[in-house]
Amino acid sequence: MKNSHARALRGDVQGWSHGATRRNTEFLMSVREDRLTGAGVALTLTLRDCPPTSDDWHKLRRAWELRMRRSGMVRLHWVTEWQRRGVPHLHCALWFEDRYDIACAVDHWVAVAGAYGAGHRGQHGRIIDGAVGWFQYLSKHAARGVSHYQRSIDNVPEAWQTKTGRVWGKCGDWPVQEKLKIHLQDQFGDGGWFAYRRLVRSWRRADARSSGDAYRIRSARKMLQVADPVRARLIGFMEWIPYEIQGALLANLAMRGYQIHSI
């Protein structure tokens, strides 16, 4: 098949793409929240004025990151998004070894970005309270796609349109679960995969009900509803599930006689 869509030059990132969104989401979902040591904080760092180029923006971010490393930061995840008025801002989660220090992170941001109107009142931070806090951060940033207004190319400054630079990144020591490929079969073929999808849907509905989120409940109910019967057999899912829950679901399938092979 011929693929003739326009491609960006290697190294010239032009905003959020489906690939960048997928890789960011895959990383966030791979983090073992039970092994996140230290004291975490979630931040939104803003500017009043837009830097002239994306290179200027990334110089600010790198300068701030260097200051945070010197201040004891042990890990960091960040994403660049844009307000409707075309000004970038930074969402990030960072950990210190033994203290929650939102003020330190904000002070350093104001110091490096003050020339673009960054002030203390425009910055926001909260403590990442263990696994619960991480789940809140994950649900916010893993659910956003390229169509979200903060990631839309329409809000990228005109001078940045041909080159935005990297839109997300990480550094430090992150405890992650390595990728694992699993084949699920029964005597007729891929029946284990279909059974697994139904288990995931049941878990999603139960988890959504416990949160009281009406949107998540509707989304979970419609997870496998596809009008095309051929596509219905192929459709997958991308949902964060706790590692222990995944193990329990696979154990359920094994007890029911399905063959489970990891490769």
Image (spheres, grey):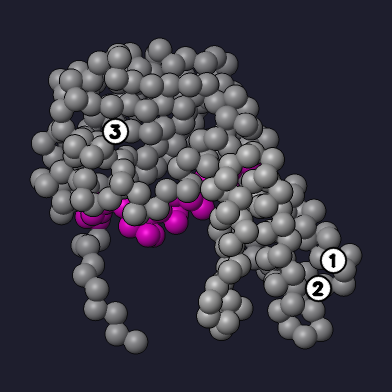
Tell me how far mark 3 sits from mark 2, CA to CA.
48 Å
The answer to whether residue 234 is above or below residue 9 is below
Q: Pointer 1: what residue? A: 254
Q: Amino acid at mark 1?
A: Ala
Q: Is residue 13 magenta?
A: yes
Residue labelled with disc 3 = 89
Among the two numbered marks 1 and 3 on one chain, the one whose residue lies closer to the N terminus: 3
253 over 147 or under it: above or below: below
User: What amino acid type should be assigned to the residue bearing mark 3?
Assistant: His
The picture places residue 107, in percent across and down from the top left corner, at: 33, 13
Local crowd size for mark 1, using a 10 Å CA cut-off: few (<14), some (14–19), many (≥20): some
Residue at 63% from the left image edge and 32% from the top image edge: 131
- Identity of the residue drawn at 38% across and 33% down: 91
Left or right: 144 in relation to 219: left
Q: Is residue 59 visible?
A: yes
Residue denoted by label 2: 259
Q: CA distance from mark 1 to mark 3?
A: 47 Å
Q: Which residues are magenta?
A: 11-32
Residue 174 lies in quadrant:
top right
Residue 95: image x %, image y %?
A: 51, 25
Labels 1 and 2: the sequence-earlier one: 1
Determine the residue positioned at 62% across, 27% down: 130
